[in-house]
Amino acid sequence: MDNAYLVLEDGSVFTGESYGKQGKTFGELVFATGMTGYQETLTDPSYAGQIVLQTAPHIGIVGTNARDDESSRIWVAGYVVKEPSRIASNFRSEKDLGSALIDSEIVGISGVDTRAITIRIRDAGAMRAGIFSGSEATSEEQMLAEVRSQKQMKGQNLSGQVSVSERYLLPAVGPKKGSVAILDLGIKRSTLEHLNERGLDVEVFPSNATANEILESNPSAVFFSNGPGDPEASASQVEMLRELLKAKKPFFGICFGNQLLGRALGFDTYKLTFGHRGINQPVQNKSTGQVEVTAHNHGFAVKLEEDEALSPEGFGRVRVSHRGLNDNVVEGLECLDIPAFSVQYHPEAAAGPHDSHYLFDKFLNLIEEN
């Protein structure tokens, strides 16, 4: 295998082997701790603009298949693994992971010390990085200069890159119980399936849709999806959400949708040092005291130190419904005077824990009550 180089903006250089397509790629280097679900990670639009490092040492053993894709393509900017499997050994496999990366033109690197790189990110924080292989592997000085010329993740609006270009409708499975207008900021297929299976017609709107367009479709409720980028750079979608909240439509947001709800209510968001990316993160439901094992993928969070506060934007009382037990990060919001709530983690949890599926039932109940 040809040599490949992972170059971090702090000047660190790790030498390994080319994995996937040869060439060069840039992004924010982050680590994901899941021991399973690499295909769901790769096809999660929330990873757009990021080079993903898998902390699990052996990746690719079960291959890939179309059913487990969370979207229409692989979205990661690059891929870093320690030891890729030489075979795909699973009856559901349709293609080995290396071939899938090549077909999707994803530049990756293998054979590096992922534990050492993870520790560096954990201590220094997520940082800009580049993967170089083939003819793009030049001098360390030149590669580092290219990495340092890239944009920081903070300040980037990426939802337009991952959203649909035109609205579309997915009919409910079984008897219809209502309809949901979804703002697609990078939605995952499993989220759509959860809503459809609960008897909801789902109409998906592109990220540049207006509040009037959504309200004119007369939905029973509104949903904002997960997605990549900095919520502070999404002012137009925050203003749009404020208009929807004033209309008193039931609202549910996941991940990026949680951050946008926080900003719409008047609270700030901030960038985490290295983020939460894994499938076994403990989160406590503040109402019940119950601890949920949850799936995460977020590098930003809502800033709210108290467990209950008044919305600076006039939407009444807001309660922190969930907090992460590892670092006390806000993992959920609930409005007490309007029908709106959100969670920072991923209750759809494809290839992850199922403790939080009840949130989709909570959304359905909110729709039926209103």
Image: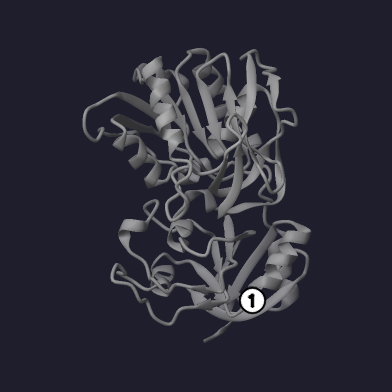
Circle 1 residue: 5
Q: Nearer the viewer, residue 117 or 74?
A: 117
Spot occupied by residue 336 in the image (x, y as percentages of width and height): 58, 17
Q: Is residue 268 left or right of residue 92?
A: right
Q: Is residue 19 left or right of residue 117?
A: left
Q: Nearer the viewer, residue 216 or 80?
A: 80
Residue at 48% x, 66% y: name it: 106
**Secondary structure category for the residue under label 1:** strand
Amino acid beneath label 1: Tyr
Q: Quadrant of residue 217?
A: top left
**Residue lying farthest to the bottom in this orientation:** 1
Residue at 46% x, 34% y: name it: 359
Answer yes or no: is residue 12 visible. Answer: yes
- Rendered position, 98 above or below 3: above
Q: Quadrant of the C terminus?
A: top left
Spot occupied by residue 107 in the image (x, y as percentages of width and height): 52, 69
